[in-house]
Image (cartoon, rainbow, N blue to C red):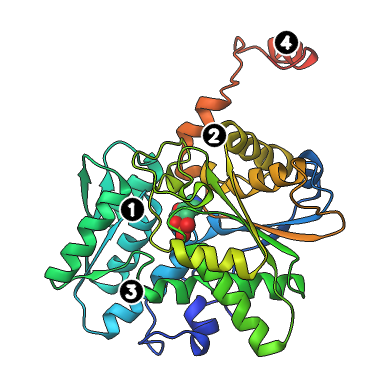
């Protein structure tokens, strides 16, 4: 393939956005689809599992696919500033693409609930980072109102261009597999990504006549409005990227689940963190905790007998990079052993079992 220049260069002719001739890009997309047989066994899935490692995007999450599209479209429309609410990754991504475009960027975040690596990105890329004493859902209401009243473009996934950019990941999976997977598993927060994948797969189906995958969505037990069918006033989970109680694209998520004969289930934080550790320890693929919710969902759905994956091909989307949230890795698995600075002591330690 020619040099990779990002998702608009590759797929712009199939994206309904303005400005595809002048993309604002950081060469996002083109992320690897990694076979994960050891993880499939560890999770007891009995399927051929592949990990779409979206943590390898330029700012460390899939949000970059949507943001190249949203910022390109905004710039082509003459915008000078963008705004978003964020649990962290949208903030980092918006800030980076705004910097690339020479635009202003304001991000609104729930105070104290953002992983350090995400905040660090947003600050480094030069955004105005504003914290509120309130939830993501409240922050989203505020930026929606602000973008109605001030000359600033909203770049949350309510922005259609975001979905147009993010749908490209579905096409990359089909290209890498040479086929449509039987199942696609992913975490669901504000439900932009499930909407985008379903749009991507549907458009592929319409263009080629090939089949459609079934979609498995996973929400955190304490933030599972779609699973339980009601808004969650005070969402709680240590998987902060999906700590959302009132998803903006709720109805589209239901549509994707219904049309694909899919499943959505709630997974506990313990189940999420277990899957998160296993992905890194069995395959060397380090994602952030929220990203592992899809894996935890697959495991749970199989265990409960809700789905049978025997002999199936499954793609699990790992939405963000593990280094975004180093404290989660260290909190749950701090196994640093100490020895005196002597080789003998090291060899002695290596003979024993790990602490
Ligand atoms: C944004 C995000 C999600 C949730 O995606 P939605 O489109 O809001 O459903 C999941 N994981 C990570 C790492 C994210 O950044």
Task: Indicate the secondary structure of the residue bearing disc 4.
Answer: helix
- Quote the CA–CA distance across marks 4 and 2: 41 Å
Q: Assess whether mark 2 and mark 4 are in contact (beta carbons under 8 angstroms).
A: no
Kindly indicate whether the residue at mark 1 contacts the one at mark 3 (C-beta within 8 angstroms). no
Q: Badge 2, how many Cα within 10 Å: few under 14, some, many 20+?
A: many
3 or 1: mark nearer the eye: 1
Of residue 351 and residue 28, the one placed in the foreground of this image is: 28
Q: How many marks?
A: 4
If the image is split into quadrants, where does the C terminus sit? top right
Q: Answer above or below: position of 117 versus 334.
A: below
Which of the two marks, 4 or 2, is nearer to us in this view?
A: 2
Q: Earlier in the sequence, mark 4 or mark 3?
A: 3
Mark with earlier residue (2, 3): 3
Residue receiving disc 3: 71
Residue 344: numbered disc: 4
Q: Position of residue 13 (x, y in %)?
A: 50, 90
Using the numbered discs, state the Cα–Cα distance from disc 2 to disc 3 in whole angstroms.
34 Å
Quadrant position of the N terminus in the picture: bottom right
Q: Which mark is residue 269?
A: 2
Which numbered mark, 1 or 2, is in the foreground of this view? 2
Mark 3–mark 1 Cα distance, whole angstroms, equals: 16 Å
Horizontal side, residue 276 vs residue 62: left or right: right
Q: Secondary structure at mark 1?
A: loop
Marks 4 and 1 sit apart, C-alpha to C-alpha, by 50 Å
| Element on which disc 2 rests | helix
> Mark 1 and mark 2: span between their CA atoms?
20 Å
């Amino acid at each position: 393939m020619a040099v990779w220049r990002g998702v608009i260069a590759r797929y712009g002719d199939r994206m309904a956005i303005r400005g595809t001739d002048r993309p604002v890009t950081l060469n996002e997309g083109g992320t690897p689809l990694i076979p994960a047989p050891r993880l499939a066994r560890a999770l007891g899935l009995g399927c051929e599992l592949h990990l779409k490692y979206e943590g390898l995007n330029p700012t460390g999450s899939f949000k970059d696919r949507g943001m190249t599209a949203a910022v390109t479209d905004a710039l082509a429309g003459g915008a000078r500033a963008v705004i978003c609410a964020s649990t962290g990754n949208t903030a980092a991504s918006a800030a980076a693409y705004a910097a690339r475009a020479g635009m202003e960027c304001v991000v609104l975040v729930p105070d104290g609930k953002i992983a350090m690596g995400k905040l660090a990105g947003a600050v480094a890329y030069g955004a105005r980072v504003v914290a509120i004493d309130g939830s993501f859902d409240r922050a989203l209401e505020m930026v929606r109102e602000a973008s109605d009243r001030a000359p600033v473009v909203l770049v949350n996934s309510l922005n259609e261009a975001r979905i147009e950019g993010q749908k490209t990941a579905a096409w990359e999976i089909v290209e890498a597999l040479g086929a449509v997977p039987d199942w696609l598993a992913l975490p669901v927060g504000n439900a932009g990504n499930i909407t985008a994948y379903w749009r991507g797969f549907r458009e592929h189906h319409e263009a080629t006549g090939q089949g459609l995958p079934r979609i498995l969505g996973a929400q955190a037990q304490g933030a599972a409005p779609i699973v339980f069918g009601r808004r969650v006033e005070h969402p709680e989970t240590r998987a902060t990227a999906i700590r959302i109680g009132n998803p903006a694209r709720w109805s589209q998520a239901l549509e994707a689940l219904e049309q694909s004969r899919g499943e959505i289930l709630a997974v506990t934080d313990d189940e999420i963190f277990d899957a998160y550790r296993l992905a890194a320890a069995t395959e060397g693929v380090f994602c952030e905790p929220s990203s592992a919710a899809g894996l935890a969902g697959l495991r749970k759905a199989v265990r409960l007998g809700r789905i049978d994956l025997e002999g199936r091909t499954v793609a699990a989307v790992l939405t963000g990079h593990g280094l975004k949230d180093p404290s989660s890795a260290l909190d749950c698995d701090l196994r640093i052993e100490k020895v005196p600075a002597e080789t003998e002591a090291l060899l002695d330690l290596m003979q024993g079992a790990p602490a």
